[in-house]
Amino acid sequence: MKRIIVLVSGGGTNLQALIDAEKRGDIRNGSISCVISSKEGVYALERAKNAGIPSRIVPRKNYSTSESYTDALLEVLIEEKADLIILAGFMTILGEKFIKAFENRIINVHPSLIPSFCGEGFYGLRVHEYALERGVKVSGATVHFVNEIADGGPIILQQPVDVLENDTPETLQRRIMEQAEWKILPKATELFCADKIKVKNNRVYIFE
């Protein structure tokens, strides 16, 4: 049974999707053992508490550099014996030292079909604003491993979602969460925990 650590910074909707998936039995080979927040008082911590999951706070504001924050976070993750780290709305850039320590063991969900509308500066509603401005007919979500390049790690799963003519950034964001993010993030988590993922030459191979 793999130990899953979820890193959060806000409301924790993707965390809730993972909690619900584990309760349903969709995640069978891993368990969320700890939720770590970069901020105090965020609702994601309430979600963890309501689910009986231990949580810890490592406030980004308490560290003057990203290097010192990376070191503090690494220490906590080693203490928690993390097998898999999931970024669920974690709004802090992770340093190279962190990524190398957990190579191909950190996954993130991004609200677009990478390589569209991704990379530095593309987060939250901005992603959907750009998608609508460009007039795309299909958007979606991508779960990928995290590397040194923003949204540049090996792609694990993608799920397309139709863009509707009357969409706003808010309605598109919600539909992508419901139809894509909350489905493929738990699925990718279980694939990892069941040892059904192999990474070779920056590509992910899945063994069902």
Image: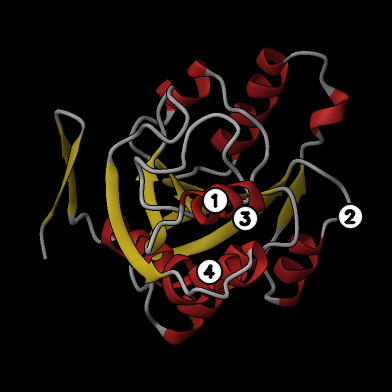
Image x and y of residue 120, in percent: 55, 29
At mark 2, the secondary structure is loop
N-terminal-most mark, 1 or 2: 2
Of 14 and 106, nearer the camera is 14
Q: Which residue: 14% across, 28% down? A: 201
Q: Which residue: 44% across, 69% down? A: 163
59 relative to 40, above or below: above
Dot 4 alpha-carbon crowd within 10 angstroms: few under 14, some 14 to 19, many 20 or more? many
Of 75 and 115, nearer the camera is 115
Q: Which mark is residue 34?
A: 3
Image x and y of residue 41, in percent: 89, 55
Q: Which residue: 62% across, 72% down? A: 171
N-terminal-most mark, 4 or 2: 2
What amino acid does circle 2 point to?
Gly
What amino acid does circle 4 point to?
Met
What amino acid does circle 3 point to?
Cys
188 relative to 63, above or below: below
Query: Residue tagged by mark 1?
Result: 133
The answer to the question of whether label 2 and label 3 lie on touching residues, with beta carbons closer than 8 A, is: no
Image x and y of residue 35, in percent: 65, 54
What amino acid does circle 1 point to?
Glu
Spatial CA span between label 1 and label 4 = 20 Å
Q: Which mark is residue 177?
A: 4
- In the picture, measured across the screen, residue 185 lies left or right of residue 191, that is right
N-terminal-most mark, 1 or 4: 1
Q: Which residue: 28% across, 45% down? A: 155
Of 20 and 13, nearer the camera is 13
